Image (tube, helix red, strand yellow):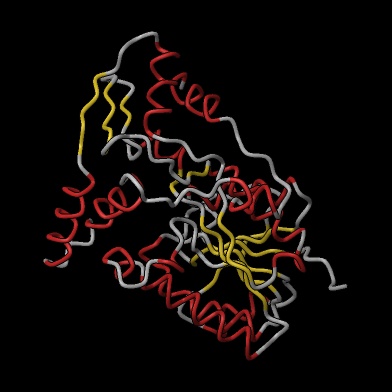
């Protein structure tokens, strides 16, 4: 039986997801180290060790990683292509587990798509990690597909519901179930993965707090507020058209349009329900309460 993972570095620990990962790792009893740039002004919980690093330097990162068991990267999508230096340093420091910044749609099944082209930083990084793991069998990895960040998306309007105007944007029929995860839930997922290192080694896991349709969310908000919300119908085919046009001009804001087409289109079949949800089937977590999440947002 492999030694347990105890000491974990979190990269991007001050970000929206990183903060939640740090909190859940601490709750689960891990020793957490946050990496920060030399000029970072970010603040961290008192129980978290902080190491200042140069992300462009394998030597700096290797030194910071010495004695640690795992690395969790939660850096933003725009920076994911820069993780290879971190991977090389992790191997030099004999770190045993690497969780890259996947968190989002499943990048293992986007080959040949426009959105897959935008996500090449993630795809190539994980390919690189898998190759290094094959060369160094003691170096293991776990990829995590979470679907959309649901609680964050409600707050910042990316899920399509506006509580101020009581307006909902519904794509196509609105009945397609969508893989979605709350940020604290993803922190629990990371902690569960690192608590069960043998079971989760070298696997790509798809997880979800729940898999709601847009119409299910609409039903909840209308029941909670006691009002009929204004529904604005939209087309995922039109979103794809807009996204492809943007992409042809080098405009990577196309990602949002292409994402809407990918996940909300009728027949997308990208929900991770039942045995497909590794959070419940493999990690032993419970799905979360959709209504409770939506109601909490409405009450904020």
User: Residue 51 vs residue 118: left or right?
Assistant: right
Q: Residue furthest right?
A: 1
Residue farthest along the bottom direction in this orientation: 135
Q: Is residue 40 above or below residue 163?
A: below
Quarter occupied by residue 124: bottom left
Residue 297 position in % (x across, y down)? 46, 26
Q: From this view, report whether residue 50 is shown above or below residue 120.
A: above
Left or right position of 124 against 45: left
The residue positioned 73% from the left and 83% from the top of the image is 138
Q: Position of residue 186 (x, y in %)?
A: 58, 49
User: At 52% from the left edge and 25% from the top edge, which residue is drawn?
Assistant: 291
- Of residue 286 and residue 60, the one placed in the foreground of this image is 286
The number of numbered badges drawn on the structure is 0
**Quadrant (top left/top right/bottom left/bottom right) for the N terminus:** bottom right
Q: Position of residue 131 (x, y in %)?
A: 55, 86
Q: Quadrant of residue 76?
A: bottom left
Q: Residue 228, relative to residue 84: is it above or below?
A: above
Percent from the top left, x then y, of residue 72? 60, 64
Name which quarter of the figure residue 99 lies in.
Answer: bottom right
Left or right for 268, reference 128:
left
Residue at 39%, 62% (x, y): give it: 77
Asked if residue 261 lies left or right of residue 37, the reply is left
Residue depicted at x 26% and y 38% = 172
Q: What residue occupies the far top of the structure in this picture?
A: 226
């Amino acid at each position: 039986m492999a030694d347990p993972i105890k000491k974990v570095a979190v990269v991007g620990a001050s970000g929206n997801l990183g903060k939640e990962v740090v909190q859940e790792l601490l709750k689960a009893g891990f020793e957490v180290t946050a990496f920060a740039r030399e000029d970072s002004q970010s603040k961290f919980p008192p129980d978290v060790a902080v190491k200042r690093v140069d992300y462009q330097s394998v030597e700096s990162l290797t030194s910071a990683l010495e004695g640690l068991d795992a690395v969790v990267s939660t850096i933003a999508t725009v920076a994911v292509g820069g993780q290879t230096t971190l991977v090389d340093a992790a191997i030099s420091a004999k770190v045993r587990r690497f969780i890259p910044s996947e968190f989002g749609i499943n990048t293992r099944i986007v080959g040949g798509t426009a959105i897959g082209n935008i996500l090449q930083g993630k795809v190539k990084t994980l390919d690189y990690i898998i190759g290094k793991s094959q060369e160094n069998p003691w170096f293991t990895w776990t990829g995590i597909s979470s679907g959309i960040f649901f609680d964050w998306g409600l707050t910042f309007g990316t899920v399509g519901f506006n509580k101020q105007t009581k307006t909902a944007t519904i794509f196509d029929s609105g009945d397609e179930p969508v893989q979605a995860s709350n940020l604290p839930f993803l922190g629990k997922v990371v902690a569960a993965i690192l608590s069960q290192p043998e079971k989760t080694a070298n696997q790509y896991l798809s997880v979800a707090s729940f898999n709601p349709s847009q119409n299910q969310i609409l039903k909840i908000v209308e029941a909670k507020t006691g009002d009929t919300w204004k529904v604005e119908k939209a087309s995922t085919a039109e979103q794809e058209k807009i996204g492809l046009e943007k992409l042809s001009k080098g405009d990577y804001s196309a990602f949002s349009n292409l994402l809407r087409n990918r996940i909300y289109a009728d027949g997308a079949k990208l929900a991770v329900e039942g045995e497909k949800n590794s959070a419940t089937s493999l990690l032993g977590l419970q799905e979360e309460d959709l209504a409770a999440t939506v109601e909490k947002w409405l009450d904020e």
